Amino acid sequence: MIYISYKKLEKIFFRIKAIQKSYKQINNVNLKARLFKEYEDLKFNFFEIKSLVKLMDHSTSNKISISKLLNEKCNRCENEIFKNKYLFSA
């Protein structure tokens, strides 16, 4: 379960970063709308995975575990992904 969550997290992270890089360079309104919808769906999926990871993390009493490392990865990804909150404001 941890491995699947990790792979999903990685996929979401790389796709959101790709959308962020290409969004402002695109002039097609329909494509921008599609990217915005995909971005919102990816954010929703990210937060679902993050809540699942937190559940796994809180269920273990070990100070060092794979679930704790995955939780840290989630936090770092969230900081990196969402530091640009105003990507779609223009």
Image (spheres, grey):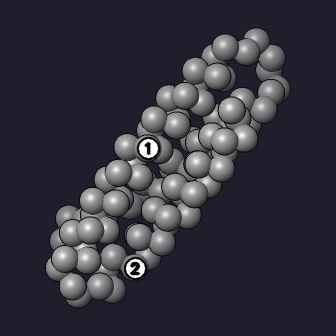
Examine the rendered structure and indicate whether residue 55 appears above or below residue 26: above
Examine the rendered structure and indicate whether residue 6 appears above or below residue 63: below
Q: Visible in this render: residue 78? A: yes
Residue ID for mark 2 = 22
| Percent x, y of residue 30 | 19, 77
Examine the rendered structure and indicate whether residue 68 appears above or below residue 40: above
The mark closer to the camera, 2 or 1, is 1
Which quadrant does the C terminus fall into?
bottom left
Among numbered discs 2 and 1, the one appearing first in the sequence: 2
Badge 2 element: helix
Badge 1 element: helix
| Percent x, y of residue 57 | 66, 23
| Residue 45, disc | 1
| Residue 78, disc | none
Q: Visible in this render: residue 72? A: no
Which residue shows up at 49% across the image and 64% down it?
15
Q: Amino acid at mark 1?
A: Asn
- Determine the image quadrant of residue 44: top left
Which residue shows up at 35% across the image and 51% down it?
41
Q: Amino acid at mark 2?
A: Ser
Which quadrant does the N terminus fall into?
top right
- Determine the image quadrant of residue 85: bottom left
All told, the count of numbered labels is: 2
Which residue shows up at 44% across the image and 38% down it?
47
| Percent x, y of residue 9 | 58, 48
